[in-house]
Amino acid sequence: MQATLATTAEFKGAGLHSGAPARLTIRPAQAGHGIVFRRTDLAQGQGGALIPALWDLVQPSRLCTLLQGAGGATVSTVEHVMAALAGTGVHNALIDIDGPEVPILDGSSAPFVAGILRAGLRMQRKPLRAIRVLKAVEVREGEAFARLAPADHLEIDFAIDFADAAIGHQEKRLDMANGAFLRELMDSRTFCRQSDVDAMKASGLALGGTYFNAVVVDGDRVLSPGGLRHADEAVRHKMLDAMGDLALAGAPLLGRYTGHRAGHAMTNRLLRALFDTPGAWEWTTCSDDLQARLPGAGVDRYDAGTVGAGIAARAVA
């Protein structure tokens, strides 16, 4: 069955790249609605402020995922909230936002997950359809690649390599069923090198970035207070990003995603390749057994208080 929120969840913060304050409200939506952003600061006539969260609306953008609706409205840095929705099994929601960029909050999906759990989930009387990968598709750029291959549930396998010893080579593979997103990935923050921060700010980016909403490293040093939440937090965050970008397929994916040095643009290219390849995918209606293997299954074991307490504890560690 499809699911939406039982009530609204509200978030306030600054955009990572713009630095502008933003208010984001996730609202319940009817079955079949999907995930749709609505720019409340723009004129609402004829749907011009609506931006469906779909792969074919992704536009080229540096360092984040940016969507543009048919009316020209845009919203950027959607990957963390999209990962939170997919990871909690929310299929239908209207997301009001009063500016062009989603607030970065603590740099992970955990605050969004806590808010969604606080609002609660409501099951809807309409079957859920998923996208089953039938044959492998792959995109490459130099040494980087991303691949989707058949599997009976979502798996994510990721590897990264950075010269900085604080990151280095990291790899991780997860079966995303049964609440794995909440257990393993949701609290992992975006990361960058100090030299990247300096270059981005010189280019007018990362104006809202701080040592508290990103893991900043310099060689073998972690500059962010409190250090790492996980020894392999960097690759976990890359998997979180992939989860959010794959959620733009418009339905749960049944397949194995493999990323090596991949980023937002490459994952979107992979979705485009999947949907452009004849016979590479099909729609399937989820049985109870299949739905039990989706990322949002099992999240009823978690509560907002536990997730929120974990965020607060790490913030003062």
Image: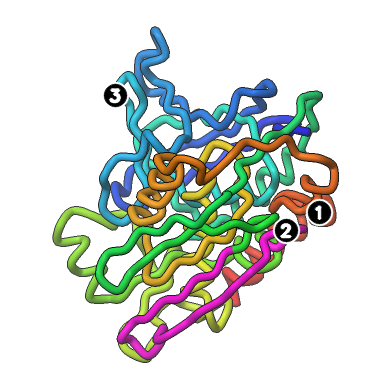
Q: At numbered mark 1, what does the secondary structure look like: helix, strand or loop?
A: loop
Mark 2: secondary structure: loop
Q: Secondary structure at mark 3?
A: loop
Residue under numbered circle 1: 298
| Total number of numbered discs in the rendering | 3
Give yes or no for residue 177 being in the magenta stretch: yes
Q: Is residue 227 left or right of residue 72?
A: right
Numbered disc in front, either 2 or 3: 2
Q: Residues within 10 Å of mark 3 (few under 14, many from 20)?
A: few
Q: Residue at x 44, y 65 (%)?
A: 190
**Going from the N terminus, do you reach mark 3 or mark 1 first?**
3
Which residue is under mark 3?
72
Which three-letter amino acid code belongs to the residue tagged 2? Ala
Along the polypeptide, which appears first: circle 2 or circle 1? 2
Identity of the amino acid at label 1?
Answer: Gly
Q: Is residue 99 above or below residue 189?
A: above
Residue stretch rendered in magenta on the structure: 156-180
